Image (cartoon, helix red, strand yellow):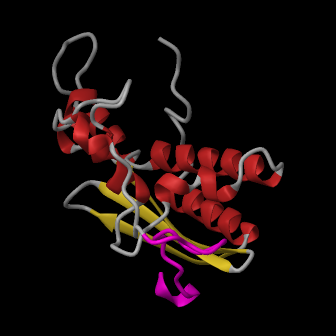
C-alpha cells in the first residue's frame, strides 16, 4: 500500500497553522479564526477575504481520528494486541497530518486561482458560509440525492433541485446568499 502524504510528519500542528495563517494573509485575508472542538473531534478554520468589492467568509472543518480509531491504529501488527507505545505515538501525532494536508490543499488551490485557471469563488464555493451560518456544501449535499453518482441520504429524487436564496431576479454582481461580512465578524 502506498504511503499517505504526511503520514509520519513530525511538523507540529502549531507550525502548520502558522504556515496556513501566513499563506491566507499573503492572499489578502482580513480575518482568520481557528476553533478546536474536543467533543466532536473537529478543527475548524474560518477566514474572510476581499475580492473586488465583496468580502467572502469561508470555513473548512478537519475531522480528526476518534479515540476508537487511535486505539485501532495502536494494535501491534505482530501480536495483534494493543500497544501502549503505539497508542501514545498516535495520540501525540493527532492533527499533524490533517493540518499538513489542509496546507497542501490551500497552496494548490491558491496557485490555481493565481494562475487564472479557476476563479476563487468557484473553487471555494462549497466552503463559503451563507447567511444562515452553514456552508454551501452543508446546504447542498443533502439535496443531491437522486443525482447520477450521488450517494442517497434520504432516497428522494425531489431533493435534487437546486436551492436559491431568493426567487427574485438579481442585479449583476449581487450576492446569492453568501455572507458579505466585515473583517471583524470572524
Relative to residue 137, is residue 26 depicted above or below? below
Where is residue 58 shown, x and y percent of the image?
51, 65
**Residue 74 visible, this angle:** no
Question: Residue, x 28% and y 31% (percent of image)?
Answer: 146
- The image quarter containing residue 133 is bottom left
* Dominant secondary-structure state across the stretch colored magenta: loop
Q: Quadrant of residue 80?
A: top left
Left or right: 7 as drawn, with respect to 51 = left
User: Residue 152 magenta-drawn?
Assistant: no
Residue drawn where x is 23% and y is 31% of the image:
152
| Residue that protrudes farthest toward the front in the picture | 169
Q: Tell which of 92 and 13 is nearer to you.
A: 13
Residue 2 image offset from top left, x and y in percent: 52, 15
x, y percent for residue 93: 41, 45
| Residue occupying image coordinates x 34% and y 39% | 90
* Relative depth, front residue between 9 and 133: 133
Q: Residue at x 40, y 70 (%)?
A: 166
The magenta segment is 168-186
Amino acid at each position: 500500500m502506498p504511503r499517505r502524504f504526511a503520514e509520519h510528519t513530525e511538523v507540529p500542528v502549531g507550525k502548520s497553522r502558522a504556515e496556513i495563517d501566513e499563506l491566507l494573509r499573503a492572499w489578502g485575508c482580513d480575518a482568520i479564526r481557528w476553533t478546536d472542538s474536543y467533543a466532536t473531534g473537529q478543527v475548524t478554520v474560518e477566514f474572510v477575504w476581499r475580492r473586488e468589492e465583496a468580502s467572502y467568509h469561508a470555513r473548512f472543518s478537519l475531522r480528526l481520528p476518534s479515540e476508537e480509531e487511535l486505539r485501532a491504529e495502536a494494535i501491534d501488527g505482530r501480536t495483534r494486541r494493543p500497544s501502549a507505545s503505539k497508542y501514545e505515538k498516535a495520540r501525540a501525532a493527532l492533527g499533524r497530518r490533517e493540518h499538513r494536508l489542509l496546507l497542501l490543499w490551500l497552496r494548490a488551490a491558491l496557485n490555481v486561482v493565481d494562475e487564472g485557471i479557476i476563479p476563487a469563488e468557484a473553487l471555494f464555493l462549497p466552503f463559503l458560509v451563507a447567511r444562515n451560518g452553514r456552508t454551501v456544501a452543508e446546504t447542498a449535499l443533502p439535496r443531491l440525492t437522486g443525482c447520477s453518482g450521488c450517494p442517497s441520504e434520504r432516497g428522494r429524487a425531489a431533493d435534487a433541485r437546486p436551492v436559491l436564496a431568493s426567487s427574485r431576479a438579481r442585479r449583476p454582481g449581487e450576492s446569492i446568499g453568501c455572507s458579505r461580512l466585515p473583517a471583524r465578524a470572524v
